[in-house]
Image (tube, rainbow, N blue to C red):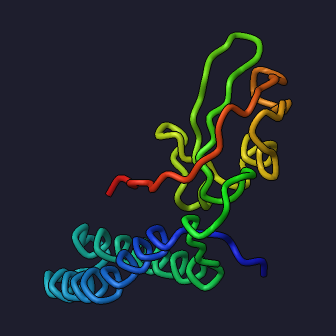
Amino acid sequence: MNKEPMSQYGYQKLCTELKNLKEIERPNIIKEIDIARGHGDLKENAEYHAAKEKQLFIEARINDLSQILSNAQVIDPQTLAHNKVSFGSTVKIRNLDNDKEFIYTIVGSTESNPSCGLISFGSPIAKSLIGKIQGDEVTISLPNGENDFEILEIFYKKIEFEK
């Protein structure tokens, strides 16, 4: 399976969540199931069924996180040259049709948050920008059709992810 780029911050965030699920949430839900089991008939025990459902969710999330982390390729974008658009680059672009400017930072898929300007390296916008240099014009296919953009600036900016 292919490795997926991820920042050190994103990797640590997922490791922390996985540790919490394994060391705190999993043992707590086992206790909850045990307590609910003591309340009698399991067929009609809503507390027991809710706890079992929560346990399934926790186990599924543990499996998902384990898979994501095993395929992670941790990259420190600060060490990369940002003379071309690459992973971790922050890019300022201008729509040539309406002169609107946008700023995007290219991150791993698990770290993306488009409303905050963090776009996945696999998104159509990022795919169109990667490898380009300042001054290049690119055509990007968006839901409203193709749009032409000019790359105004490429730089590294440390990202503060929301917690």
Name the residue: 44% across, 80% down.
59
Q: Give residue 96's position: percent from left, percent from top.
A: 76, 17
- Give the quarter of the image for residue 30: bottom left
Above/below status of 30 relative to 129: below
Q: Give residue 128's position: percent from left, percent from top.
A: 81, 43
- Give the quarter of the image for residue 87: bottom right
Considering depth in this image, is 33 or 12 the residue closer to the camera? 12
Side (left or right) of 85 relative to 155: right
Q: Give residue 160's position: percent from left, percent from top.
A: 38, 54
Q: Residue furthest top?
A: 98
Quarter of the image for the N terminus: give it.
bottom right
Considering depth in this image, is 46 or 73 the residue closer to the camera? 73
Q: Give residue 159's position: percent from left, percent from top.
A: 44, 54
Above/below status of 16 relative to 134: below
Side (left or right) of 16 relative to 33: right
Name the residue: 76% across, 20% down.
144
Quarter of the image for the C terminus: give it.
bottom left
Above/below status of 112 relative to 74: above
Name the residue: 59% across, 41% down.
104
Considering depth in this image, is 50 or 106 the residue closer to the camera? 106
Side (left or right) of 10 relative to 21: right
Side (left or right) of 51 relative to 61: left
- Give the quarter of the image for residue 161: bottom left
Considering depth in this image, is 73 or 43 the residue closer to the camera? 73
